[in-house]
Amino acid sequence: MPEIPDLEAIRGYLNERLPGETITKAECLIPIVFRVTKGEFVEKLEGATFGQTTRRGKFLLFGFEGGDVLVINAMLAGRFQYVEPSAKRRASTCMALGLSNGQELRYHDDRRMGKIYLVSEDRLLDVPQFAEMGPDALDVSREEFLERIGKYRGQIKNILINHKFLAGIGNAYSDEILFAARLHPYRKRSTMNDEDIERLHASITKVFDWATPIVAAQMRGDLNYKERRDFLKIHRKGGEPCPVCGTRISEITAGQRITNFCRNCQPES
Ligand SMILES: [Zn+2]
């Protein structure tokens, strides 16, 4: 699942290429992922000129001159391609946008779980989750973080991945953030002091600022890059030595979710 570093890398790539380009042909190929009718999608996008692409949580927002916004939540398996129109299309290509520079922007989704919305910028709150989503994890001040987290009392990992608290943190990076903050993932927020919470807040930016350029380098000009998270320090490293103290990294699987931590660096209390 793409998380903030992946989406930030994609956003950076697109903002170097899309602004000022006009859509010459808009194709809705797998209607099930669209939350806009095919007719409206084609009518509004053909002839539209790209502005900036932004991000809110796990949503990418493609802005257009004139105020429409194409909002895409890639969910588990959605990926983008920026290719020559002659490049073979994958069977799971849901959307293809022909551009005035001769390239094509595509979205494909093997699981068809992603969602595509097209709304005017003053109607963004109509997109499901937008109204309830907390501030973006990269855009929350220390004061706001302290104030918001006070409303939650449960296990800190569950709080971090709750989009109502902060938008954009998923399973993999929550493990990395908690490792950087030296906090046990199952530690109750109510047992943490101000210093713990400030360290947690600082670790969010630290981890994302570290990971985003690594992911951007992996991408190497190919939007449809293979997501590799082997550079992470703790997530999916169960059984390996902790990079800080050498203790064997713990792994707990609950539901579909793997949680890794170092029981020495991240004590339970
Ligand atoms: Zn350790």
Image (cartoon, rainbow, N blue to C red):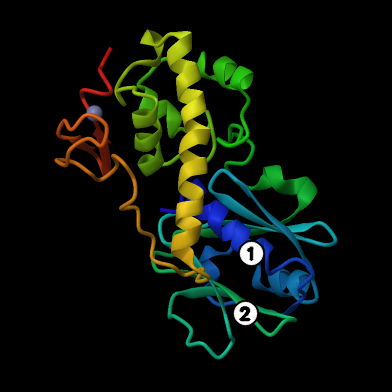
Pinpoint residue 248: horizontal percent, then vertical percent: 14, 34
Looking at this view, is 183 or 167 the one in front? 183
Tell me which amino acid carries mark 1.
Leu
Q: Is residue 72 above or below residue 160?
A: below
- Of residues 65 and 9, the one nearer the viewer is 9
- Pointer 2 local density, CA inside 10 Å: few below 14, some 14–19, many at least 20: many
| Residue 11 at x, y percent in the picture | 61, 57
Where's residue 66, x and y in %?
A: 85, 61
* Residue to which mark 1 is pinned: 14
Q: Amino acid at mark 2?
A: Glu
Query: Residue at 30% across / 23% down in the picture?
Result: 184
Residue 141 numbered mark, or none:
none
Label 1, residues with CA under 10 Å away: few <14, some 14-19, many ≥20: some
Q: CA distance from mark 2 to mark 1?
A: 12 Å
Residue drawn at x 45%, y 38% is 207
Q: Nearer the viewer, mark 2 or mark 1?
A: 1
- Does mark 2's beta carbon lie closer than 8 Å to ligand 1? no
Q: Quadrant of ligand 1?
A: top left
Q: Position of residue 156 (x, y in %)?
A: 38, 23
Q: Which residue in the protein does label 2 denote?
A: 104
- Say whether residue 116 is visible: no
